[in-house]
Image (tube, helix red, strand yellow):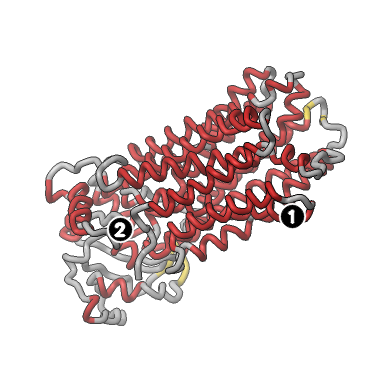
């Protein structure tokens, strides 16, 4: 593929500014040479590739090759940060509502048996949101969903803060959950589709932002409790002020998304919809931000094709590759829409469904009754004040932040890769859960419960990376949203099942939780496709 680099290249920042181009991405020159990219007269020629990498310009026309030649630079780094803000908002709202339940219960004089309606409302909204936003982004584009989820959650968060009745509050919280539910299915897909394959593991880093959201929620709570020891300000209850503060943070995140990057539609989505000129414009924009101005000839635009994931170790790799490109190339006529249940995805889809359900069932059952479990071990979890509650949440959330760094490293190792990291973190989680059951000393209980939090953070980091990676562009967000929705459903019913089992024995929910997570690890080992780029 031929392209030209400006003789006086500049780097366009996401905010629209420009600056003198610095040193190019290490793989940029090599990628330019592989794709047949040519510099304009007066610029040094790109180094020639090794003979085994040489290919004619017309052969090197897959979108993944072009994105790899552009490289991982300022555009992807900024996008990763802004996607992370969505994940932070997700956890901030979810934990914030959970921590506010006691105050809301007192405010509306709710019976204890009805206090769970608030959490059920936000989970129900997240369930509908995960499915709806995923389907919407596969139909009209990632960009629109990416820009709409935060303002939707901000609006309904503000409406929740002024709700005069519990019914209207639940309705507003459902809307809040609907907005929040789109972050994980949409943001991960968007980042992956702008990112070179060898850098897609950085998606696991978004789990850091998820824990940051929990920390942010606790910090807001601590601040308001400290400033308003009486629990109200001008007759405005403290829980309503918390919602306003979180809505303000969410609005600030939305402003950052609108101003810190000039976001174009995903080039993979555009090419899957055969909107070729727009896809090329998006690629040229990303290249300019990263410091390499590419241009494409009409012939190259017409020959550009998708190159979706195929398992490198699959025996029928050639057949899958033909099928995958045939679904999206114009050479065979009208594109054929793939499905999550096509023969090449069916096993993976069913195993992923099982993993998402089992993981949500196991971890939610443990976390929902952690206070009861610790009390049974002789450890008091009743704090002296609301300040202690929020401080404990802050420490607990912060302890899981390093887990994302661990996951980011493990998924790119030859030993673990994606599937191995997913399976080993699940198996390790089940082991420490059974250690928790057997623990009798306070130290052992605290260590085992903390390790559950660490391994769960690693597991979720990997599963939110693997799921969008394994599916093709045209169904990626829908598949990701469906899996996320199944996890939400399991999260809704898990406390109900756990509560029923606790009436029989306090240890039964723990055994069920550990067994469910262990089964998810076994399912991970059976996944037929490894999404890590093979060297």
Residues 366 and 435: in front is 435
x, y (%) of residue 126?
52, 33
* Quarter of the image where the N terminus is located: bottom left
Where residue 444 is drawn, which disc sits there?
1
How many residues crowd mark 1 within 10 Å: few (<14), some (14–19), many (20+)? some
- Alpha carbons under labels 2 and 1: distance apart: 42 Å
Mark in the foreground, 2 or 1 = 1
Across the whole image, how many numbered discs are drawn on residues? Answer: 2
Left or right: 62 with respect to 506?
left
Residues 426 and 412: in front is 426
Residues 17 and 170: in front is 170
Left or right: 400 with respect to 150?
right
Residue drawn at (70%, 41%) of the image: 370
Q: Vertically, is 121 above or below 228?
A: above
Residue 281 seen: yes
The secondary element bearing badge 2 is classed as loop
* Quarter of the image where the C terminus is located: bottom left
Residue drawn at (36%, 50%) of the image: 266
Where residue 202 is drawn, which disc sits there?
none
The secondary element bearing badge 1 is classed as helix
Of labels 2 and 1, earlier in sequence is 2
Left or right: 376 with respect to 309?
right
x, y (%) of residue 405?
57, 62
Residue drawn at (40%, 75%) of the image: 26
> Mark 2 highlights which residue?
311
Residue 453 seen: no
x, y (%) of residue 367?
65, 41
How many residues crowd mark 2 within 10 Å: few (<14), some (14–19), many (20+)? some
Residue drawn at (17%, 71%) of the image: 56
Q: Vertically, is 105 above or below 182?
A: above
Contact, mark 2 vs mark 1 (Cβ under 8 Å): no
x, y (%) of residue 203?
48, 56
């Amino acid at each position: 593929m031929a392209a030209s680099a400006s003789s006086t290249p500049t780097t366009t920042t996401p905010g629209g500014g420009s600056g003198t181009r610095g040193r190019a991405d290490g793989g940029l020159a090599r990628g330019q040479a592989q794709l047949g990219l040519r510099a304009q007269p007066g610029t040094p020629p790109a180094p020639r590739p090794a003979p085994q990498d040489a290919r004619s310009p017309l052969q090197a026309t897959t979108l993944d090759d072009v994105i790899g030649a552009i490289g991982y630079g300022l555009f992807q780094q900024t996008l990763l940060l802004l996607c992370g803000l969505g994940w932070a908002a997700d956890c901030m709202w979810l934990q914030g509502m959970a921590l506010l339940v006691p105050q809301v219960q007192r405010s509306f004089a709710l019976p204890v048996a009805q206090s769970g309606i608030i959490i059920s409302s936000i989970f129900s909204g997240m369930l509908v949101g995960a499915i709806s936003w995923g389907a919407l982004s596969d139909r009209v584009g990632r960009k629109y969903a990416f820009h709409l989820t935060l303002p939707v959650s901000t609006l309904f968060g503000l409406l929740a803060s002024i709700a005069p009745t519990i019914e209207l509050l639940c309705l507003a919280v459902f809307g809040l959950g609907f907005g929040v539910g789109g972050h994980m299915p949409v943001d991960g897909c968007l980042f992956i589709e702008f990112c070179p394959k060898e850098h897609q593991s950085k998606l696991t880093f978004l789990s850091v932002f998820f824990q940051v959201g929990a920390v942010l929620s606790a910090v807001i709570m601590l601040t308001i409790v400290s400033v308003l020891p009486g629990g109200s300000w001008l007759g405005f209850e403290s829980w309503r002020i918390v919602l306003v503060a979180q809505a303000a943070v969410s609005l600030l995140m939305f402003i950052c998304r609108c101003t810190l990057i000039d976001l174009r539609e995903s080039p993979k989505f555009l090419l899957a919809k055969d909107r070729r000129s727009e896809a090329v414009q998006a690629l040229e924009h990303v290249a300019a931000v990263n410091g390499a101005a590419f241009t494409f000839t009409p012939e190259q635009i017409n020959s550009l094709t998708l190159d979706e994931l195929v398992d490198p170790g699959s025996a029928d790799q050639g057949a899958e590759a033909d099928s995958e490109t045939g679904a999206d190339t114009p050479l065979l006529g009208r594109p054929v829409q793939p499905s999550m249940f096509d023969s090449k995805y069916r096993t993976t889809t069913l195993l992923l469904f099982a993993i998402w359900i089992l993981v949500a069932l196991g971890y939610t059952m443990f976390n929902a009754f952690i206070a009861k479990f610790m009390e049974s071990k002789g450890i008091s979890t009743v704090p002296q004040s609301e300040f202690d509650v929020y401080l404990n949440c802050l420490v607990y959330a912060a302890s899981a932040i390093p887990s994302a760094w661990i996951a980011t490293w493990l998924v790119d190792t030859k030993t673990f890769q994606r599937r191995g990291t997913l399976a080993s973190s699940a198996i390790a989680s089940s082991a420490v859960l059974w250690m928790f059951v057997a623990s009798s000393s306070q130290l052992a209980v605290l260590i085992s419960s903390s390790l559950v939090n660490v391994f769960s953070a690693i597991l979720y980091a990997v599963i939110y990376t693997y799921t969008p990676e394994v599916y093709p562009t045209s169904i990626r967000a829908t598949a990701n949203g469906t899996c996320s929705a199944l996890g939400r459903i399991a999260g809704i019913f898990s406390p109900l099942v756990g509560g029923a089992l606790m009436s029989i024995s306090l240890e039964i929910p723990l055994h069920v939780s550990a067994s469910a997570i262990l089964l998810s690890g076994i399912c991970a080992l059976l996944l037929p496709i490894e999404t890590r780029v093979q060297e």
